[in-house]
Amino acid sequence: MQSSHRSIVTSRPLRRAFYERNTVRVAKELLGKVLVRKLGDTRLEGIIVETEAYRGYDDAASHAYRGPTRRNQVMFGEPGHAYVYFTYGMHYCLNVTTEPAGQAGAVLIRAVQPVKGIVEMKKRRRTEHLRDLSNGPAKLTQAFAVTKALNGHDLTAGKKLYITEPSVTEPVHITASTRIGIKAGAEKLWRFSIRRNPFVSKL
DNA sequence: CTAAAGATGTCCT
DNA sequence: GGACATCTTTAGA
């Protein structure tokens, strides 16, 4: 029964080579992987169910499209790092950097399915509703205590924040759709989600 | 220096 | 379905 208290992770963090590839491909392959956040004694885990690709060089919707700035510089750096930015005066969004160093790219983590540390997530989110804990980019950063303090964090080190394989891998049915909340590049089908998963932010 | 928009969430009708 | 909270970043004068 109480599987929500047990870790579903056995393996090491995804390696740098996983991230050092085409952003769209990484976005698809991140579905079904497990986001892990270590907060002292507590450990939070969630299955990634929704992502969006933001590629620098040919994607007008990307923060990196017009070249490096202080905010987006981590997108141009080594792959496998967290790119966390602040938006709308109150929200953080979590991305993982992709493509070889020098070439900008990132995948926005839009939603995860809570697995472990649900009690802690409910406190942070100030709600008892499981569905509402992490079904959106700013919701999951609140649930997982991700702020700009983690901007640039190396996701391959297995420290405070990383991504890894679940211990039991199930086949993932991927749905591709248009990205949410953008104007330029709105026609690209670069939003990926696990089909019919109830924790996806929007159908 | 100033202005305007933003890879959103929440509450209201 | 729409208003609005709230502030950083960026672009442009």
Image: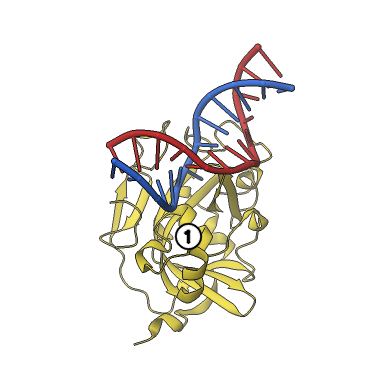
Chain colours: A yellow, B blue, C red
Image quadrant where one finds the N terminus of chain A: bottom left
Judge left or right: residue A176 versus residue A185. Answer: left
| Identity of the residue drawn at 27% across and 59% down | A195
Instruction: Determine the chain carrying the residue at label 1.
Output: A
Alpha-carbon neighbours of circle 1 within 10 Å: few (<14), some, or many (≥20)? many
| Identity of the residue drawn at 48% across and 72% down | A45
Q: Where does residue A129 sit, x and y in percent of width and height? A: 37, 67
Residue type for callout 1:
Leu
Residue A18 higher or lower than A171, as above or below: above
Judge left or right: residue A116 versus residue A42. Answer: left
Residue A99 higher or lower than A135, as above or below: above
The secondary element bearing badge 1 is classed as helix
| Identity of the residue drawn at 38% across and 62% down | A132
Most extreme residue toward the left is A196
Judge left or right: residue A98 versus residue A184. Answer: right
> In this figure, which residue is indicated by the disc labeled 1?
A140
